[in-house]
Amino acid sequence: MATTVSARIYSHHEKSDGTFNVKYVVYHKGERKFIDSPHFVSKRQINKDFNIKDKFVLKWLDETLDDYRILISAINSRLDFFTCEELRDYLRDSNKDIDLIEFANAHIDYLKENNREPYLLN
């Protein structure tokens, strides 16, 4: 089954100001997971089928979708080992800066949860 990514809006996600948040949809192994985008569209920017018609917004969405597709291609044969949720998280967090303190704290928590002593230098 093919893994796909697309950009969609849903009528039931209308905000109080009349706009819709564009969602990136990750489809993998028969499941769908969503990534919120920073883009919002109004009713003037969509058609009656809730497809985006604004070329400016589509340009930005296509750039991100292309980046996601490149990341998926780079995973290659390891893609079979990803669940849909793991793939969504991988794509969502791919541009996230690594926070060394956050990483160290997470590793310490992991060691504590697994009753392992941290390696200390003497």
Image: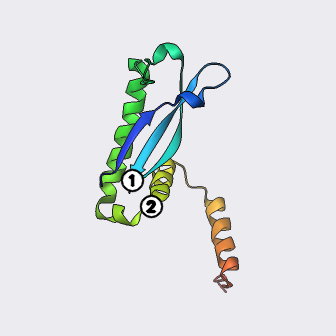
> Looking at the image, which residue is at 63% across and 83% down?
119
Instruction: Name the residue nearer the viewer: 44 or 74.
Output: 44
Instruction: Name the residue nearer the viewer: 41 or 106.
Output: 41
Where residue 110 appears, as percent x and y from the top left, is 64, 74
Q: Is residue 56 left or right of residue 116?
A: left
> Looking at the image, which residue is at 44% across and 61% down?
83
> Looking at the image, which residue is at 51% across and 43% down?
35
In the rendered structure, find residue 118 and report the number of the disc placed on it.
none
Picture quadrant of residue 79: bottom left
Picture quadrant of residue 21: top right
Q: Is residue 29 left or right of residue 99?
A: left
Asked if marks 2 and 1 touch (Cβ < 8 Å), the reply is yes
Secondary structure type for disc 2? loop
Q: How many C-alpha atoms fall within 10 Å of the one at disc 1: few (<14), some, or many (≥20)? A: many
Q: How many C-alpha atoms fall within 10 Å of the one at disc 2: few (<14), some, or many (≥20)? A: few
Secondary structure type for disc 1? strand
Position above or below: 29 against 114: above
Residue corresponding to mark 1 = 28
Q: Amino acid at mark 2?
A: Thr
Q: Is residue 14 visible?
A: yes
Position above or below: 80 against 58: below
Picture quadrant of residue 53: top left
Q: Earlier in the sequence, mark 2 or mark 1?
A: 1
Residue corresponding to mark 2 = 83
- Quarter of the figure with the N terminus: bottom left
Instruction: Name the residue nearer the viewer: 6 or 39.
Output: 6
